[in-house]
Image (cartoon, rainbow, N blue to C red):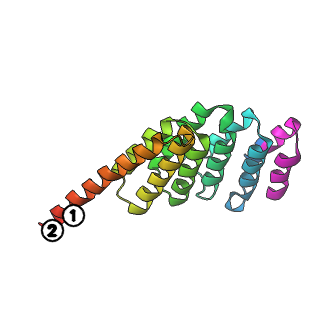
Amino acid sequence: RAAALSALGRHGTKDHLPTLLAALEVDSQNEQIREGALRGLADLDLKEGLEPAIRFTKPGWHTRLRPEAINAVADLAHHDRDRATEAIIPLLDDRETRTLRAVGPALVKIKHKDALAAFDQYITKTRDNEFRDRAETWRSELAAVLAKDDGTSTRKDIDRLEREVERLKDALDEVKK
């Protein structure tokens, strides 16, 4: 059923939207039906699919379902970038690794300037080195996309990295004391 729902999105029409929305209400093992419906909504590419997809990004849903929903929101974001960004940015604070791994690329794909500040804030406050590095990469990718790689993003990245090096040097000096 999940594969059929996904295919319905790829090959269907607006008339199939109610079927996909109804499938979002069906419980299944490991949320496979909802995942197929979310993929179908993303592929069908209608504005009406955005809010239902956002619903499944929130905590409380299965950890495998939420990244699928985040990806669907990113795919549908061109219908309302502000709403998609508003829904995804708070997920940078999520404790689920799968969710966080989906959030960064989704924000890059959405291409909204507000995500730059969100990445900066996350980079500053996270204690997880792996995700700090990932967030720095996501931020750089987004900055390049937004600046159309006109060189301004590169200069800002260099400045940010120089500040980070100084911060690390100070931290190392403290440890040596």
- Left-right relation of 98 to 46: left
Q: What residue lies at 83% left-to-right and 43% top-to-bottom?
A: 19
Q: Are there few (<14), some (14-19), or many (20+) residues within 10 Å of tag 1?
A: few
Image coords of residue 49 (percent x, y): 72, 38
Name the disc covering residue 20, or none. Answer: none
Front residue of this view, candidates 27 and 88: 88
The residue tagged 2 is 176
Q: Within the magenta stretch, is there residue 9?
A: yes
Q: Which residues are magenta?
A: 1-20
Q: At label 1, which amino acid type do we have?
A: Leu
Q: What residue lies at 60% left-to-right and 37% top-to-bottom?
A: 84
Considering the image in quadrants, where does the C terminus appear? bottom left
Q: Helix, strand or loop at disc 1?
A: helix
- Left-right relation of 160 to 66: left
- Left-right relation of 171 to 149: left
Image coords of residue 147 (percent x, y): 53, 38
Q: Are marks 2 and 1 in contact (CB under 8 Å)?
A: yes
Q: Which secondary structure is most common in the magenta stretch? A: helix
Q: Within the magenta stretch, is there residue 164?
A: no
Front residue of this view, candidates 86 and 115: 115
Q: At label 2, which amino acid type do we have?
A: Lys
The answer to whether one can see residue 22 in this image is: no
Report the label total.
Answer: 2
The correct choice, above or below, for 175 with respect to 134 in the image is below
Name the disc covering residue 172, or none. Answer: 1
- What is the distance, in whole Å, between disc 2 and disc 1 at their CAs? 6 Å
The answer to whether one can see residue 144 in this image is: yes
The correct choice, above or below, for 134 with respect to 143 in the image is below
